[in-house]
Amino acid sequence: MNLNKFPPVLLDDAYLYCNLAETEQLDAGLISNLFSTEDVSTLPIFSAKERPVFRLFDLSILEILRTKGLDKHPVILSHLLDLEEGDIPEWHGGIAIEVANKSGIIKANHFKCDLLIGRSFEVPGPSRECSALVLFNLLSEHASHPFYLHGRTGYELFQSYLASGVSGVVLSPDQFHEEPGGEVFRFPLAGGASLRLLVKGGAPEAIDIRSRCLQDSQAFLRTSHSDGLWSNAKEPLQSSKLLPHLKQYLQLARLSPRDFTSNTCFAPGNPAAKSFHCELPIIQGAMANISISPPFAEEVFRAGALPCMALAGLGPQQAEQLLSDTTQLGIPYGAGIVSVSESDEALEQIVNTLEKHRPELVVLAAPQLDHVQRLLKTDLNLAVHAPNAAMLRVLFDMGVRTFIIEGEEAGGHVSRLGSLSAWQEVLSEIRDQRIEKQVHLILAGGIASHFATELISKLLNFYELDEGLKVSLQMGSAYMATSEALELSPLPESYQQLLFELDETVVTGETLHRNVRQLATTGTYNLLEKEWTIFTTNIDLNEKKAAYEQIYQGAHRRAITSSTPDDSASYMAGAATALLKKRCSIAQLHAAVMPAPDQTDTTPTSPDEPIAIVGIGVHLPGAESVEEHFYNLLQKRCFIRDIQDTSRFKRKEFLTDDPADRSRSYSGLAGLLPPLDNDLSKFRIPPTVAKEMGTVTTPRTGLCQ
């Protein structure tokens, strides 16, 4: 395998956007999509300086390229190809295999190739329901080859990828447009894949596209591309705007560190965790019909996280009883409500219940701004879902300070942005507005392993937000894989078993802007067909909504109450399902996401064993308090520095190059105290006396505060 055959930055559909003369000086791979052997004849004549890359949707194109002397250029085999042993020949230019889900990665590992490319659903064109974040997790854990990622990759995320073992990226030119020029729909392809296309003409055009796609999906794949439907842009991006971005990515590829290790932003006991009175900065997301069990909530808290009770779908008396029972446990907990599902009258009842029981956190999903205003009039600790930077700006101006940034990977009702895309938007906004010390972010969607946690820490570092910004994590679907969920919540074993058996999810409700992510069961695909039948029927919008509600009414509750899989049920789950392998405990789930510090002494101690407190104040390198020192230990921060010449320390007098010279030190390294406050007036010691006090006595006095 030879990774050098592929530049670290590849530009998709490059020849639709770039002036060839301008790209000759760039060390970037320029991708052309070839759907059939006829497309080879349309290729331009490449100069010696160009680095063309061909993505193939038909294996027979390989032989045509060889006969035309183009086998010196690398090729990408689309994830839509059903590869078999012996399909991949020796190829001088190098071969990459595109993958879009877990099974594709496992299969590609058995082929001889130079590279895997993870294609996420965040880019237009053919994909499956794995985001860049989920693919990063899967490839980091399972890939036997070097790998690139194809998603919406900003500069900071690119650096984070490189520092996390990713070898390069594929960029789609439309990511550099500020606004899309239409609405994205999914259309079915063979084998469970889908075609995400930009629809500019609304419902009529979407219906026409689906009809053409169902007639001949392979032919439509090519025509949709040539018609420009794979681009989310209003107009083609000109070379003059695109090339500066490419140059920046290439510079980062050359200079950005590959062995960079950042401190984790999610250490136990950090400020984000303390703000919710928990050990870990983890929130268990509210799951309708599932997280309605106080005993389950108690186990979540005992394992270090903040549990969150789901009030959606509960009547006033049920919500009152649930919060009353949970409050009696004496633990911090959250309560989640779906704003768009509640009338103003129902919201008032919920607010009264919340003010009575005062949960640690109130989570408002699908927020209506008038409901946000009503909750801000209380003194409840409010966290509001903000799917993008624009919504965050609006909510921040209203007075919200805790935000849940949940990507499209999440289970249940979802936004239209993948997690990494949404997080990049929001982090850029926070950095640009310099409000990092005023807000608390809760990141959600596709998180179920330490690979995600470590990537997020690096991302925050490259945004220079790793110190001032409070960040927590939220997981939902991952908790459904725990033994406690099975034992203590209404979750049936049949539901949990589907989590382990199915690696994929699908999104329903897209036709009526009610996107819901659920497991890709046979029943789910049947529900999708019924949904599209309603969408294409010649009835008014309100009738369509009523018909839609009828097919999904009670569907999730049927999933909870059925002891066996039910084709009429809705098994809501996030894309992180692909990362769930087997049942685990809540503590094991937390450890997998955020490993605890190493324990050097595992000797059990008696709970009644007497202890002695030997110190309550410290001045240590990097810490002026016990709390700072403990946090530094958890972060594994090192404050050993090279000593510089001072009035009290002369390097020439105290240092030697001879390790055998016992009269002097051969190391100039030390952990030094920060500058100390010599103002002892607070102890009623006048300055004249303080000057006469020794250098040891002064800091000791300060520790007595």
Image (cartoon, rainbow, N blue to C red):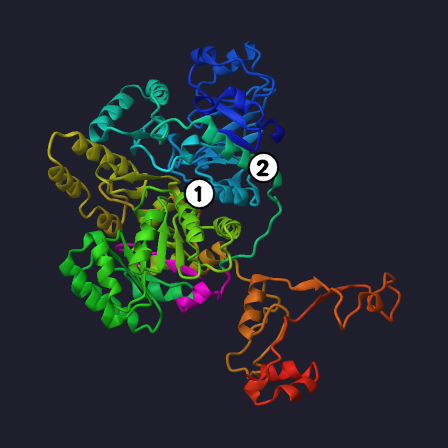
Relative to 690, say whether 130 is above or below.
Answer: above
Between 652 and 1, the residue placed more toward the observer is: 652
User: What secondary structure is found at the residue carrying circle 1?
Assistant: helix
Q: Is residue 230 left or right of residue 566?
A: right
Label 2, residues with CA under 10 Å away: few <14, some 14-19, many ≥20: few
Q: What residue is rendered at 69% in x and 82% in y?
A: 696
Amino acid type for the residue under numbered disc 2: Gln
Amino acid type for the residue under numbered disc 1: Val
Label 1, residues with CA under 10 Å away: few <14, some 14-19, many ≥20: many
Dominant secondary structure, magenta: loop
Give the residue furthest to the front.
688
Residue 464 visible to the viewer:
yes
Q: Is residue 251 left or right of residue 271?
A: right
Q: Give x and y (percent) for residue 240.
A: 47, 28
Q: Quadrant of the C terminus?
A: bottom right
* Image: magenta residue range: 267-291
N-terminal label among 1 and 2: 1
Q: Which residue is mark 1?
A: 134
Q: Give x and y (percent) for residue 558.
A: 22, 48
Between 150 and 386, the residue placed more toward the observer is: 386
Q: Which residue is mark 2?
A: 251
Q: Is residue 629 magenta?
A: no
Q: Give x and y (percent) for residue 494.
A: 31, 48
Q: Is residue 672 left or right of residue 95?
A: right
* Count of numbered labels shown in the rendering: 2
Residue 86 visible to the viewer:
no
Q: Is residue 275 magenta?
A: yes
